[in-house]
Amino acid sequence: MSTTTDAARLLAESSDERVTEFHVRDVQLPGGPTMALITMDNGFDHTKPTTFGPRGLLNLKEALDGVEERVRAGQVGAVGLTGKPFVFAVGADLKDVGRIADRDQALAIARLGHEQMRRLGELGVPSFAYVNGVAMGGGLEIALHCTYRTISSGVSAVALPECFLGLVPGWGGSYLLPNLVGPQAALTVMVANPLSNNTTISGVEAARLGIADALFEPADFLTESLRWTARVLAGEEQVERPEVDRDEQAWQAAVDAARATVDAKVAGAAPAPYRALDLVRLARTADRDAGFAAEDDTLADLILSDEFRASVYAFDLVQRRAKRPAGAPDTGLARPVTKVGIVGAGLMASQLALLFARRLQVPVVMTDLDQARVDKGVGYVRAEVDKLLARGRVSPDAANRLRALVTGSTSKDGFADADFVIEAVFEQMSVKQQVLAEVEAVVSPECVLATNTSSLSITEMASRLQHPERVVGFHFFNPVAVMPLVEIVRGERTDDATLATAFATAKTLRKTTILVTDSPSFVVNRLLGRFMGEIARIVDEGTPIPVADRSMAGLAPMPPFMLLGLVGPAVALHNNETLHRAFPDRFYVSENLRRVVEAGKPGFYRTDGGRPVLDEEVLELFEQPAEPVVLDPAQIRTRVLSALADEARRMLDDGVVAEPQDIDLAMITGAGFQFWNGGLTPLLDRTGVAEQVTGRRFLPRGVASTP
């Protein structure tokens, strides 16, 4: 028994992984030899995807030992590998890897993955991966070890997301993929996509890139894959792959271009993407043993990094805490929602109408001041349904049902039998109070009245109503279909039944929720307001915008002044004005930002040749200080992180949310803060800013960092 296997058995003893089995059955190929077809299955449905922990990898070893013996006996002429319905495999069990305590253990799990997966390409007979469903991380890597690959056109996600998680593809992907499709395409999958909000590609795109050799429809995917296999083995079908350009300069140029992307996104704040670049550079000349050994060493280093531990913490928040929101009342108190009313028919309201209709499958009535606005809102929904139909995301029957579910009116009388009404009108207290009063006059006493306000007081909004206990904040983030978070805000008089209904509704909408105490701008917008206010103050004092933007690479989801363009200068100004009224000593309102809003500018950047450049007209609006103070990136980072640490501590002390984990979950799912930073508070702990500013850490050592 190898030392690696011994170490893996020790790890397996302390593991609580969802163990993957590798079921082997014989398949007689049409007119060809017998194939040993291996199906990877953890015994659960597609909602719990197949992963590889130490016990799973030992099961792979056992399955391959048996197959290898039969190959030597001449009983098997090919080996196939596929997954359970809708899932091929999604790689390592992160929770298990996150428990590894020393480098020897990390090295053992890296080597075990290589030792077993590489056997699929070294059995003495051809191996075929039939990628029938989602293939990510080690799930894609195990397919790359096979001689050939087919993929279903129905596969929704193919990815190597490790850099997003503070790791690298360490079970063969960093070596095999560039040698299969070339460095440029490989680096897109390995580095660029993970750093772009963890983008995945489809099965069709994977086949186009050359990751798979053949593409088949999902209805008869395995049958067609086996027929194709038989033709390949018989020599009737030639598998042609474009030759990879191994020229040193061309290869290095691809690595250098990817490095520029990494610098812009990360600026040295996370080691993983840089280590991935080194591995791809090495892959041009290294043999398989050297390439895999380099992956082993890199993976062992990164498994023990704070960035990976923060990623495991973030992953746990998104996968587990999000399903059990802290402070949510008993689900049994929730009332059924059989009809929804939406006040407003603008872009946000229209997005909400589509989401409610699609997820709840109940009638949705939109209202607005005049018929033209109503028609525009309903028209938007129908146009979006048409797009879903064209992309194959809904069937023709489902599209017809969705169109019929969403209607519009200039009267609120249609809300009379609604169980849940949400307003999405202009962000002004008097307007929202009037709207809710008009709705209350029509609806039943049990109807929940929700507001999508991003910053205003729920308590004040409900104060003039006969039943303020049924008003709840239900704050979405834009774009509604993409951003997972809904902040559920409890006013002073909001009752448990209303809250429970809000949480149940959000769950049906497939949204992540956190419970927030009524306070200015709640969680995400309050922290972004402090962040953007501090950056704006730094720029107003004399630091150039490009320097300020570059300083936040790797710490914020995008450059701050690009974020202002995405949010909208007017929205950002309104948020900071609201916060300044509440906390004038901490929240800065930029007069330069006000000038940009008054000039009607949509943002600080414009597009030139497909690239963002600062808008000269915006810069001309800025009033320059008499004695400019120019900070360097390190000084900017310290100031901004110090402000965020101060605000986050105040929010926890004031009970805005229950725990730091709620802040991090909100910043990850509502603002796109990175996994490798754990959202926000692990970053503040890691940099030492938390203790410098507040006198203590947000999280105990080892929760989102190495012990």
Image: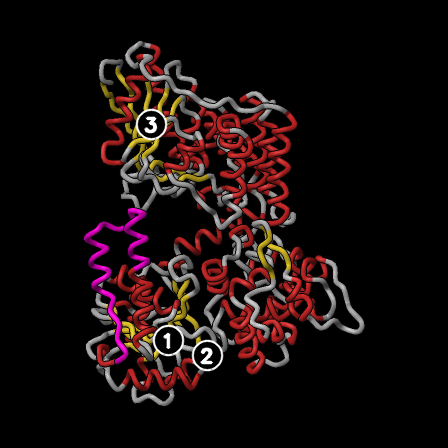
Q: Which amino acid lies under the numbered mark 2 shown in the image of this protein?
A: Leu
Image location (x, y in percent) of residue 396: 21, 51
Image location (x, y in percent) of residue 365: 25, 72
Which of the 4 quarters of the picture holds residue 494? bottom left
Residue stretch in magenta? 383-411
Q: Nearer the viewer, mark 2 or mark 3?
A: 2
Considering only order in the chain, which callout, 1 or 3, is on the residue closer to the N terminus? 3
Q: Secondary structure at mark 2?
A: loop
Residue 451 is labelled as 1
Q: Are marks 1 and 2 in contact (CB under 8 Å)?
A: yes
- Cα distance in 3D space between marks 1 and 2: 10 Å
Q: Which amino acid lies under the numbered mark 1 shown in the image of this protein?
A: Thr
Asked if residue 655 lies in the magenta stretch, the reply is no
Residue 456 is labelled as 2
Q: Quick check: 348 above or below 2?
A: below
Q: Quick check: 99 above or below 328?
A: above
Which of the 4 quarters of the picture holds residue 212? top left
Residue 81 is labelled as 3
Q: Nearer the viewer, mark 3 or mark 1?
A: 1
State which quarter of the image contains the N terminus: top left
Q: Is residue 648 visible?
A: no
